[in-house]
Image (cartoon, rainbow, N blue to C red):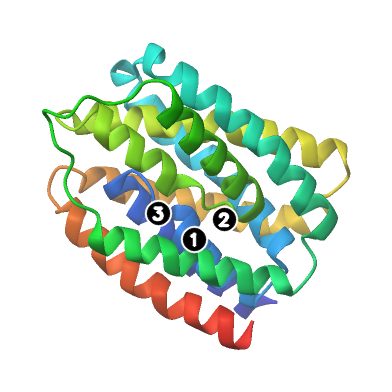
Amino acid sequence: MVIELVLIFIILLCGSFVQGVSGFGFGLIAMSFLPFLFTVKESALLVITLTFILSLSIAVQLFKHIQWKSLLVILSAALIGRVGGFLILHNYGDMDILKTFLGLFLITVVIYLFWNESPNPEKKVNGTWLPIVLGLSGGLMGGIFAVGGPFFVFYFLLVFHDNKYAYSANLQVTFVITAILTITLHGVSGDFSMEFISYFLVGLVSVLIGSRIGIHYFAKLSQQNIKRLAAVVVAIAAANLILFG
């Protein structure tokens, strides 16, 4: 039990640090390793709940940079996607096959992180179908695997390519609001166990420490290098999930 809690603390500390530095990555890191200890359902619920705390902590610090009008379409679509994600996780979250699907999705995200090009500042960002598609996709994947961040990252990098504080602030608000919906739906459905409390408390301390450190180094470390390092770690874990999950 003690070793398990230590492993959870380390995994979540690394994930929260990456999120504090780059704006996302907590779910990617955490969901790459937690399913080796729990089911996908248990892992996702822990990550989503802690994402709420972590993102709220960062959003409060960057509150003045939030641009609410830019959130309307993508956030509305994300909430719809989260309902679909809830239905799948609630009914099938204990099945081992989800670990394979999670591994495949993580590999896809790694490919995106490595080959994603910098946004073109002169290219006009579509304000209708693009945020709808990305919002639905991010909401669905976030609701099932707690790793819907890349879809939102892609959109907000396009919209706020010249303002990394607005990018991070709007990203965190999206995580906060979608997490509230998911936590409420699973709470009403009785998906949280008593053991969850101990894991949550350990995770809470971990993410608060990790995010503080990450925010401290936000302006000092290269976001791109942090993402690449995280991508390598996620790729290794994803391969293990596919082969041995």
Question: Label 1 crowding class (10 Å Cα cut-off): few <14, some 14-19, many 20+?
Answer: many
Q: Are marks 2 and 3 in contact (CB under 8 Å)?
A: no
Q: How many marks?
A: 3
Question: Label 3 crowding class (10 Å Cα cut-off): few <14, some 14-19, many 20+?
Answer: many
Q: Position of residue 232 (x, y in %)?
A: 32, 73
Q: Position of residue 152 (x, y in %)?
A: 41, 39
- The mark nearer the N terminus, 3 or 1, is 1
Query: Secondary structure under badge 2?
Result: helix
Instruction: Measure the C-alpha gap from mark 2 to mark 1.
Output: 6 Å
Q: Is residue 5 left or right of residue 117?
A: right
Q: Are marks 2 and 1 in contact (CB under 8 Å)?
A: yes
Q: Is residue 9 visible?
A: no
- The mark nearer the N terminus, 2 or 3, is 3
The mark lying in front, picked from 3 and 1, is 3
**Given the image, on which type of amino acid does mark 2 rest?**
Gly
Mark 3 highlights which residue?
25
Q: Residue at x 73, y 68 (%)?
A: 39
The mark lying in front, picked from 2 and 3, is 3
Give whichever of 29, 70 is nearer the camera: 70
In the rendered image of this protein, does residue 210 appear above or below residue 124?
Answer: below
Q: Position of residue 117 (x, y in %)?
A: 19, 51
Residue 12 is labelled as 1
Q: Is residue 157 visible?
A: yes
Q: Position of residue 109 (x, y in %)?
A: 41, 60
Residue 203 is labelled as 2
Query: Secondary structure under badge 1?
Result: helix
Location of the C terminus by quadrant is bottom right
**Given the image, on which type of amino acid does mark 3 rest?**
Gly
Instruction: Measure the C-alpha gap from mark 2 to mark 3.
Output: 15 Å
Location of the N terminus by quadrant is bottom right
In the rendered image of this protein, does residue 226 appear above or below residue 137?
Answer: below
